[in-house]
Structure formats: C-alpha cells, structure tokens
C-alpha cells in the first residue's frame, strides 16, 4: 500500500502528548463501514481492533444506524440524566427479555455513567458499602480503568504511575497460571485470608476479568473461575466480574463468565453494550445488594438515550437467537486459531505462545519489542491491530463479531506476512 504523507500538524501541535493510538496509525481516518476504515486519501484498512472492543457489530452497522437516525429525526430525547424515557424503557425491557431472563440472571441494572471506568468505580463503591470494608482484591496484569479507584485495582505499573498519588485499598493476587502451574490455585490468597498475621485486611470483594485483554490476552480456565467463586462464598467476599471488553459476545456467550457456570455478585459492562460505539455502561448486581440511596452515585451523562436506542437494536438483531451468534463467534474463533497455529509453526523460534477465546486472541513473541514491529508493518499493509501485555509484547486481535470469513482470512494472511517481514 502506497500512503501519502498525511497532514498531522494540528494533532501534533495542539493535541496533548497523551494521545496514543494515533501514533501507531499515522493517518487521518475519514469514514468507516463494517470491518473497514478509510483515511481521507481513500486508503482502506481492515480493522482488527474494533474500537478496543466497542464495535462488536462493526462500524456504522446499518441496522443500528437506521434505528439511531429514526430516533434523532423524530426529536427523541438525547440527554435525560436518569429520567424515565421511552428509549431507556425499551432497552431495559429488551435487556431483561433477551439477556437476563434466558440466563436466569436476577440482576438489577444501574447506569453509572458513560464509560467502563464509571461502571468499575460504582461496583467497587457498592461492594464497600454492602460489606462495610475497604479492601478489594484484584489480579496480576489486571486492567480495570484509568480513574483512581479503577487504577488501584489495575496491575500495569506505567498506568498506575500516572495517578500521581498512592493507590490504596487494593491488593493484587496471582491470576490463573501466574506460576506456570507450579503452585496450587489460590494457595497464597487463602493462606493470607486465614492467617491473622498476614496483614491483609478482610476484602469486601474480588474483581476479575475472565480474559485479561490489556494484560496480554490471559485466559482464565473455567475451573479456576469456579474455584474463585467458591472461595469468595466461603470467605464472605463479593465477586465482581469486569466484562467491559470481554462481554457482549466477545468470547462466544453474551457474558464471558457463562462458560464457567458461575453467577457473579456484580458485573460491569460497557464498550459494545451500545453496539454503535456510543458511550454507555452498566453495573449489574444481585437485588439484595441494591442498598443505594437515591442520588448516592450519579453522573450527568448516565442517561445516554441514543446509546439506549442502538443497544436495543443490537440486542434485537443479534441476541434474539443468542445461540446462533455464539456459534458464529466460536466458528470465527476457530478460524483465527488455525491461522495462529500456522504462524507459530512457521516461526517456531520467534513465537512464544498464542492464546484466546471466541474472537479475542493474542500472539506473544520471545522478543518483547517484536509485537510493536508486527503491528507497525501490519498497518503499512492495511491491517489495524494493537499490542497488549505489560511490556506490549503481545499482538492483540479483536475483530468485529460480524467480520466475514473472507475478511478474517484476508486479515490473518496480512498478519502472517507482517510476522514474516519483521525481525
């Protein structure tokens, strides 16, 4: 692909140095549809990043776009705080009918604010209020958001350092397979809980991702998750599953914890819940935990009605028959896995491991800087992929769930070429 030098001057001179994704993709994007993005010069890019998991149904999904346009054209309420609106009612009813009831999940629904970290903050706050304790346990390589409470339960040292103040009341424990199977699951955690001299304050809750996306695509085994749930029950701790990036069908089932057969006490959902990339998040919790006073946790943009509209359309379109959507995602995931096996076999000396579930996959290299080189070459070849892991050592694949087999094959061929052409 021949790329002319784009005019990035206003971004480089006026926008903060904090910008990140645009540095790896130095062009100016203009439009997008499905699994493709186009820059202002008309160059096409196959998108295997999907808005960091916010676009599970692709860019400008036509069904969701039609619902949004119709709503705006009739002057439907755009901003409504937490007022009762037709858009919110339609979403709540559809979410109950298509997601909660079929899975026998009893959750109350809270709209804590428009972003994932809003949902995490509300979950931590609620757990502490219910249990009357401050401590929260998280896991190595976890990522839960960039606000202070979320950062306190995030593992990445670089992100934590940005807080500028001590991050307290969070204690990390080893994630699944952190010791490569040499230590029994939760041996350290349970020993600390039972030892009066351990120095660990009794936690109010444990927060976990079933697949650590930003942490390097680390996949928790179903049996590990079940053991964690049992430990929480024995020790009177709430279990919070952060399903912000891995929910909404990313791993196959609507919720990523379904495969383990557990029912978390609290679940955080964001990113693809709106379906269209519009800001929206949910905090779900068992009814007996609903101890909030009116207005005790609020936010100006917690009632994003256009997001309710597209979220409802997404549920009706893709989750009225959830088994079909799950089957399709798993099939696409098997296609990715086979390609990663081939890449690994071709580059045995370079590839350390591939891992994933559904349509989230990671390719880790022995050389820590190799993943960024692969991502850079992939961009030059017209493929958008990102890196993850504490040192950016993992190539992260996060295509839309609606990606076609041909698009998936095209992107995986490009990835294989990018691996071949980097050292």
Image (cartoon, grey):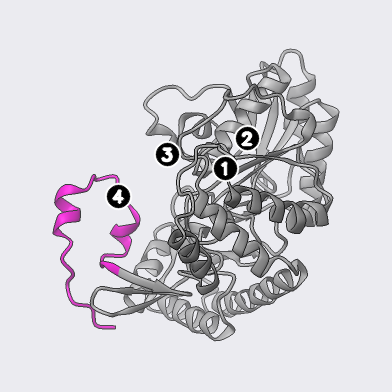
Q: Earlier in the sequence, mark 3 or mark 1?
A: 1
Q: Earlier in the sequence, mark 3 or mark 2?
A: 2
Left or right: 221 in relation to 40? right
> Residue 159 shows which numbered tag?
3
Q: Identify the magenta region.
A: 1-29
Measured in 3D between alpha carbons, the distance from the residue under mark 4 to the one under mark 1, in whole angstroms, is 22 Å
Q: Residue furthest bottom?
A: 406
Measured in 3D between alpha carbons, the distance from the residue under mark 2 to the one under mark 4, in whole angstroms, is 27 Å
Identify the residue at image location x=63%, y=35%: 138
Measured in 3D between alpha carbons, the distance from the residue under mark 3 to the one under mark 2, in whole angstroms, is 15 Å
Labels 4, 3: front one: 4
Query: Is-magenta flag for residue 214?
Result: no
Q: Secondary structure at mark 4?
A: loop
For mark 2, what is the residue? 138
Query: Badge 4: few (under 14), some or many (20 or more) residues near its Cα, within 10 Å?
Result: few
Is 350 in front, or is 236? 236
Measured in 3D between alpha carbons, the distance from the residue under mark 2 to the one under mark 1, in whole angstroms, is 7 Å
Q: Position of residue 259 (x, y in %)?
A: 78, 57
Identify the residue at image location x=65%, y=27%: 126
Q: Position of residue 273 (x, y in %)?
A: 58, 55
For mark 1, what is the residue? 142
Query: Badge 1: few (under 14), some or many (20 or more) residues near its Cα, within 10 Å?
Result: many
Q: Secondary structure at mark 1?
A: loop
For mark 4, what is the residue? 19
Badges 2 and 1: C-beta atoms under 8 Å apart? Answer: yes
Labels 4, 1: front one: 4
Q: Residue furthest front?
A: 74
Measured in 3D between alpha carbons, the distance from the residue under mark 3 to the one under mark 1, in whole angstroms, is 11 Å
């Amino acid at each position: 692909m021949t790329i002319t030098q784009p005019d990035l001057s206003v971004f480089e001179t006026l926008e903060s140095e904090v910008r990140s994704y645009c540095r790896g993709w130095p062009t100016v994007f203009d439009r997008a549809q499905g699994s493709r993005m186009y820059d202002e010069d008309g160059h096409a890019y196959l998108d295997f990043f999907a808005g960091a998991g916010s676009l599970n149904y692709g860019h400008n999904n036509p069904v969701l776009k039609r619902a949004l346009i119709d709503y705006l054209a009739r002057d439907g309420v755009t901003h409504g705080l937490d007022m009762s609106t037709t858009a919110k009612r339609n979403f709540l009813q559809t979410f109950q009918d298509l997601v909660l009831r079929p899975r026998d999940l009893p959750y109350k629904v809270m709209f804590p604010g428009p972003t994932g970290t809003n949902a995490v903050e509300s979950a931590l706050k609620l757990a502490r209020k219910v249990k009357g304790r401050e401590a929260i346990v998280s896991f190595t390589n976890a990522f839960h958001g960039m606000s202070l409470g979320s950062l306190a339960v995030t593992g990445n040292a670089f992100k934590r350092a940005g807080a500028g103040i001590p991050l307290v009341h969070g204690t990390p424990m080893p994630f699944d397979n952190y010791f490569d199977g040499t230590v029994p699951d939760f041996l350290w955690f349970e020993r600390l809980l039972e030892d009066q001299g351990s120095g660990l304050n009794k936690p109010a809750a444990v927060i976990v991702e079933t697949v650590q996306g930003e942490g390097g695509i680390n996949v928790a085994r179903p049996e590990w998750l079940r053991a964690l749930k049992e430990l929480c029950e024995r020790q009177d701790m709430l279990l919070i599953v952060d399903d912000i990036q891995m929910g909404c069908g990313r791993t196959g089932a609507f919720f990523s914890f379904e495969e383990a057969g557990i029912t978390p006490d609290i679940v955080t959902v964001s990113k693809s819940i709106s379906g269209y990339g519009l800001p929206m998040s949910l905090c779900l919790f068992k009814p007996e935990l609903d101890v909030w006073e009116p207005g005790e946790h609020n936010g100006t943009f917690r009632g994003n009605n256009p997001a309710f509209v597209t979220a409802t359309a997404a549920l009706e379109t893709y989750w009225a028959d959830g088994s079909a959507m799950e089957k399709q995602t798993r099939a696409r995931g098997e296609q990715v896995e086979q390609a990663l096996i081939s890449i690994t076999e071709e580059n045995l000396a370079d590839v350390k491991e591939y891992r994933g579930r559904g349509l989230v996959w990671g390719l880790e290299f022995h050389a820590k800087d190799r993943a960024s080189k692969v991502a850079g070459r992939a961009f030059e070849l017209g493929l958008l992929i990102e890196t993850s892991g504490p040192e950016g050592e993992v190539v992260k694949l996060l295509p839309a769930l609606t990606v076609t087999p041909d698009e998936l094959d095209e992107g995986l061929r490009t990835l294989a070429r990018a691996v071949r052409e980097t050292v």
